[in-house]
Image (cartoon, rainbow, N blue to C red):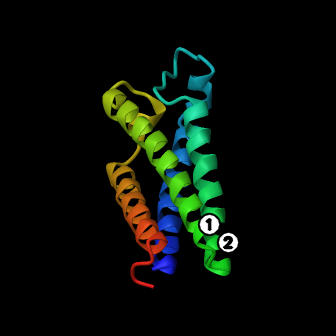
Amino acid sequence: MAIAALLCWLVTAVLGLTMFGLWLRNGGLRAARGDASFPTRLVPPLIFGHLFLAVAGLVVWIIYIVDKEVLLAWTALGLLVLVAVLGEMMFLRWKNGRTEGTPESRFPLAIIYGHGLFAVATVVLVLLTALGIGT
């Protein structure tokens, strides 16, 4: 189950990095700096906090897979919960402003919903692994 969680986490990361790249390419940082011609509803502290915590959790999860220390699984789960909260905040900001011509309004729906679906699967698999179910 730990490997399944890792694979889901990696798919989630690829989809998330794809959105991040699209946001940057479509002027996300210029918009965040206050360029009125590029409005955005996503702010760098939210985006980079989500990214940093997700990467930190992934690193902890990989160490857990190697070391099998249960505390690491729970630490990864705690980080995932924080990542999910930030992700939900970004999703709501995107949903409320996707018709405004913002850089994030150009995200393909399949990537957004795929990212969320794999993120939920990752959280569930990490929780089940931390509980010792399926090992």
Find disc 2 in the rendering and name its residue. 63
User: Is 129 placed above or below 100 here?
Assistant: below
Question: At x 56% / y 38%, what residue is drawn?
Answer: 47
**Residue sitting nearer the eye, 16 or 72:** 72
Residue 23 image point, x, y percent: 53, 39
For badge 2, the amino acid type reads Ile
Q: Nearer the viewer, mark 1 or mark 2?
A: 1
CB under 8 Å between discs 1 and 2: yes
Residue 65 can be seen in this image: yes
Residue 88 image point, x, y percent: 40, 41
Residue 27 can be seen in this image: no
Question: At x 47% / y 50%, what residue is drawn?
Answer: 81
Residue 25 image point, x, y percent: 57, 40
Image quarter of the N terminus: bottom left
Image quarter of the C terminus: bottom left
For badge 1, the amino acid type reads Leu
- Work out how far the residue at label 1 is from the one at label 2, CA to CA, in angstroms: 8 Å
**Dividing the picture into quarters, in which one does residue 70 lie?**
bottom right
The dot on residue 121 is: none
Q: Residues within 10 Å of mark 2 (few under 14, many from 20)?
A: some
What secondary structure is found at the residue carrying circle 1?
helix
Find disc 1 in the rendering and name its residue. 72
What secondary structure is found at the residue carrying circle 2?
helix
Question: At x 39% / y 27%, what residue is drawn?
Answer: 101
Q: Residues within 10 Å of mark 1 (few under 14, many from 20)?
A: some
**Residue sitting nearer the eye, 15 or 123:** 123
